[in-house]
Each structure stands twice: as structure tokens, then as C-alpha cells.
Image: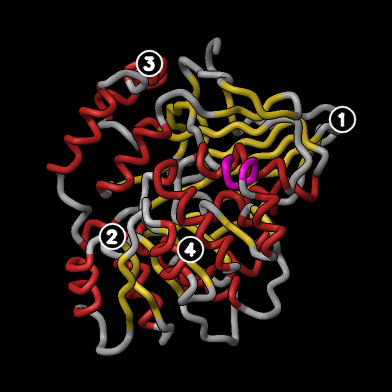
Amino acid sequence: MTSTTTPTVVVYGATGYTGRLVAAELVGRGVPVVLAGRNAERLRIVADGLPTGAAEVAVASLDDDAALLGAVRRGQVVANCAGPFVRTGDPVLRAAIAARVHYLDTTGEQDWIRRTFEVHDTALRGAGVAAVAGAAFDYLPGDLLAHLVGAPLAPLERLSVAYHVVGFGMTRGTQRSALEMLDGRDVAYEEGRWASGGDRPRRASVVFPAPVGRQTVARYPAGEVVMVPRHVETRRVDARISTVSVVPPVAARALPALQPLLERILRTPVKGLLDRAIDRLPEGPPEDERRAARWTVAVTAEAVDGRTASGVVRGPDIYGLTARLIADGALALADPSFAGRGALAPAQAFDPASTLDGLADFGVTYTVDPPRGGSGARSAATRTEAGR
């Protein structure tokens, strides 16, 4: 994701934890930035914290279409950092389409990613622009790795993605997005099609590459379920996350069994109470804690001819990486050579290998193992230990 141009990037949600990191990353590269959001005073505070003249301010609330359009028109790309995206995504993306500028965002919400494809793709193509939802830690590394592992073996019987995170402190925005993600309304990709629901394993484990090892996992409503079938021919996509990534170790083993109950609870008024309670929490982790987080994404692919392949991508600092990826992606979308149109998965918008290679200086590493087996061999990397 390289560019020789210096576009102006509109950062919507610039007063939030992630939005400030994205704005600072762009300004640090000499990219002109328009800080957009609904609160003029908070936007000015963010602007004052950046070098003089590095950023302009555009006040635009989500219910003011004219103001949103005016803000988005001031750039060549809009980076939406304001979640939950099921609430903010539609108006910002509609403004991008009307202004004929490219769009990308930091979402971790599967439902919003699905909407960009199912609701907005035709309008995006008509406007001659692209939208890449989930162009940050969620779910760019996993989607790129899935392509590198799975595409050479396609057609696939199954592609599995598994996440493991250590030391991750969530921002308020991430916690709100989690409420939207975990209410059980996500989709599964099974038998070559998307459908509501899907397998909810009661007891399952994934063997991550060393040093992580075997971990109890829960079903994860990840963006790869929506993204990967658009660029890898596969009959099924599974997504899992280690339970210790999301709850304390003492509760981790019980999480898969409790997940259906949690989903039902989050479809009641309790969800609104939890949403309001998030306001009382810290905005996000301190910088030292943020940088200390470590993550691993493992991918396995099983071809219909029995061959298997696997790969892993690892790195630090989830929110710092998000800022890096959004800045890289915005510059790539604005480059005159970029030809993508419509709703795109990261692996459709950006070259998978060169993009991951370009993150080495950030501490991101990845490996893709050569294919193995054949004649009905099956991968042992992902194993369900009991009934679903």
C-alpha cells in the first residue's frame, strides 16, 4: 500500500481514541487532514494538539446530510473511525458516495461489513469509488493471510481463522462495537452460502503455532466470514477466538457454553443499559498498555482434493497498528493507480503479500507454510473436541 501522492484525508470520529491516533499518524507523514465530527470544541482540542496548520476542522453530525457531505468533499478519502458502525456507517458512506471519494473504516462489526457489500456496492460502483470496511487490525491482517494461504489451494472445503490476543485493553468504542457483534445476529458461511446463525461449539480448541499452543476457543463473528468468500473459492469459513482473549482465565473455559445465553441477553434492554454504562469507563488503554498488547491470527485451509495449508501473522499494539493501516490504506486508495471500485475486502483492495511485508518495521511478521498432503488428508490444526 504505497503512494506517491499526498491527498487530503477526512478523519470522521477524529475526537475518539482511535481517531486521534489515525489523525496523528497521517499528520506525522505530512498528509493534510480534516478532523470531522459532531463536537466543535473537542475537534478544536484535537487540532490544537497537532502541529500548527496540519489539520482543519469540519463539524458534521450524523443526522446532518449537508454538513457531512460538505466535510467529506474536503478530501480525497474519508476514514471513518466512529463506532459502532451499524449506527455511523450508513450516513458517512452515503456522503462518501455522493462526494465521489473513497471510504475505509476501522470497524470490527461483521454486520456493517456485510452491509457495505449488500446495500452500498451498486452505488459505490456507480460513483466510481471504493469502500474497504474493516481495513484495520479488524480484519485486514487476517483477510490478507487467508488469501495467501487459501487461494493457491482453491477450491477449498474449509478455511478457518483463529484469533488470540494478549494484554488487549478495549476503548469505549470497541466495547460498544462488541455489544453489536455479540448479540447472535451474525452470519455464517456454510455449504457455499451465507446464512444466519451457524455452529456454536460448546467445547472446541485451536492449536496455535508456538509459543501460544492449544487454546479453548469460542465462535467469533469475524469479518473474514463475509470477506474471504469474495476472493477465495471455499465452501465454508470458520472464525474462532481464544476465550482468554475476551474474558479472564477463570471464566474462559465456560465462555463457549455461555455464549448462546449472552446472545439472548444482548437482544434485550440490558444491551442499552450496558451501552450507557460504558460512558463511565476509561476512554481507552494508556499508551504503555496499548503498545504492550500482542496478537496472533492463525489460518488453516483444507482443499477439496485433501491438501492442507496454514499460516500465521503476529504483531503488537492493536490500536497503533490500526492507525498505521488506515493511513497506509487511505494513501493507497487516493493513489491515481488505484483502480478498485465498489465494496471490497482488504485482499481485493490491497496486494496481500506486499502489504504484510510492508508492516515489518511495525513488528508484524507472517509465515505461510507450503501445502501438505492430498488424497483425503485433513488438517489437525483446528479440532472440535466435542459436539457442537
Marks 1, 4: nearer the viewer: 4
Which of the two discs, 1 and 3, sits closer to the camera? Answer: 3
Tag of residue 38: 2
Does residue 86 show up magenta in the picture? Answer: no
Q: Along the horizontal axis of the image, is 23 left or right of 353?
A: left
Q: Amino acid at mark 3?
A: Arg
Is 156 left, or right, of 212 in this rendering? right
Residue 12: horizontal and vertical position, in percent? 38, 63
Q: What residue is pinned by disc 4?
A: 364
Write down the residue under mark 3: 264
Mark 2 in CB contact with mark 1 (< 8 angstroms) = no
* Residue 14 percent location from the top left of the image: 32, 65
- Over which residues does the magenta segment extend? 114-119
Q: Secondary structure at mark 2?
A: loop
Q: Is 118 included in the stretch rendered in magenta?
A: yes
The C terminus lies in quadrant: top right
CB contact under 8 Å: marks 1 and 3: no
Mark 2 or 3: in front is 2
Please tell me the numbered disc located at residue 375. Answer: 1
The vertical placement of 23 against 299, above or below, is below
| Dot 2 crowding, Cα within 10 Å, few <14, some 14–19, many 20+ | many
Whether residue 117 can be seen here: yes
The mark closer to the camera, 4 or 3, is 3
User: Who's the residue at 41% across and 20% down the image?
Assistant: 256
Judged by its main secondary structure, the magenta piece is helix
